[in-house]
Image: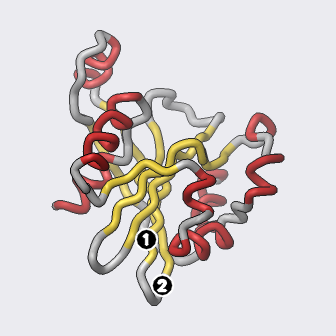
Amino acid sequence: MVLFLLTMVGCERDAEIIDLTEKNQQIGSPIKNLTIEEALNDIKFTPISILLNLTKKDIAHKNSQDEVIYIDTKNIIKIVKKEYTTYTFLVINKKQENKNSFTNLIVEKSPNKTRGYLAHYFPSNEYLIKKAKGIKTPFHGAVSFSPFTEDLKELLNGLNK
C-alpha cells in the first residue's frame, strides 16, 4: 500500500507535486526531485542511465520533437527505501489516444538488480473537473501496471505496439 501511494506521488505532471516534494526535501523525506544532470551524478542511477542510453551528450543533443515516445528527463522523482531506490519518469507518448491519461516509467534499483514497470494512469472525470478549476486534489481514477522486467528498453518499445 505504501509503495502504491509513493508511486502515486510520482505521477502528477503539475507544480503541485513539485511543491510537495520540495516540502518533503526540507523535512528530510526520502522523496526528491532530480534534474537529469543530478541523476547522472548519482552512482545508483548509473546502471539505469546505461540501460536507457541516457548520457550527458545524448541529453544535450536529444530532440524529443522527433520522437513519438520518449522519457521526460526534466523532472525525475527519486524515492529512497531501505531495500531499494526508485526513479520515476513521465513517459511522453505523442500518439496516445486518451490525452488525459499518462504513463510513468518506474525503475527500481536494488543492490543486485535493476528492473522496472510502467504505470498507466486514467484520471476520473471528477478529478479532471477539479484540476480544470484549479482545485488541488489527489489523483483519482484508474491505474494499471505492467509486469516488472529487467529489459527497460523492451518495456518502452512495448508502448509502440
Of all residues, the one furthest to the bottom in this rendering is 112
**Mark with earlier residue (1, 2):** 1
Between the C-alphas of marks 1 and 2, the distance is: 8 Å
| Residue at which label 1 appears | 108
The crowding category of the residue bearing disc 1, from other C-alpha atoms within 10 Å (few below 14, some 14 to 19, many at least 20), is many
**Vertical side of 36 occupied by 93: above or below:** above
In the image, what residue type sits under mark 2? Answer: Lys
Of all residues, the one furthest to the top in this rendering is 133
Q: Nearer the viewer, residue 40 or 91?
A: 40
Residue at left offset 61%, top offset 49%: 71
Percent position of residue 149, x then y: 50, 74
Q: Secondary structure at mark 1?
A: strand
The crowding category of the residue bearing disc 2, from other C-alpha atoms within 10 Å (few below 14, some 14 to 19, many at least 20), is few
Q: Is residue 111 left or right of residue 38?
A: left
**Vertical side of 126 occupied by 83: above or below:** below
In the image, what residue type sits under mark 1? Answer: Glu
Percent position of residue 7, x then y: 32, 54
Q: Are marks 1 and 2 in contact (CB under 8 Å)?
A: yes
Say the numbered circle drawn on residue 113.
2
Percent position of residue 155, x then y: 58, 64
**Vertical side of 45 occupied by 17: above or below:** above
Tally of numbered tags: 2
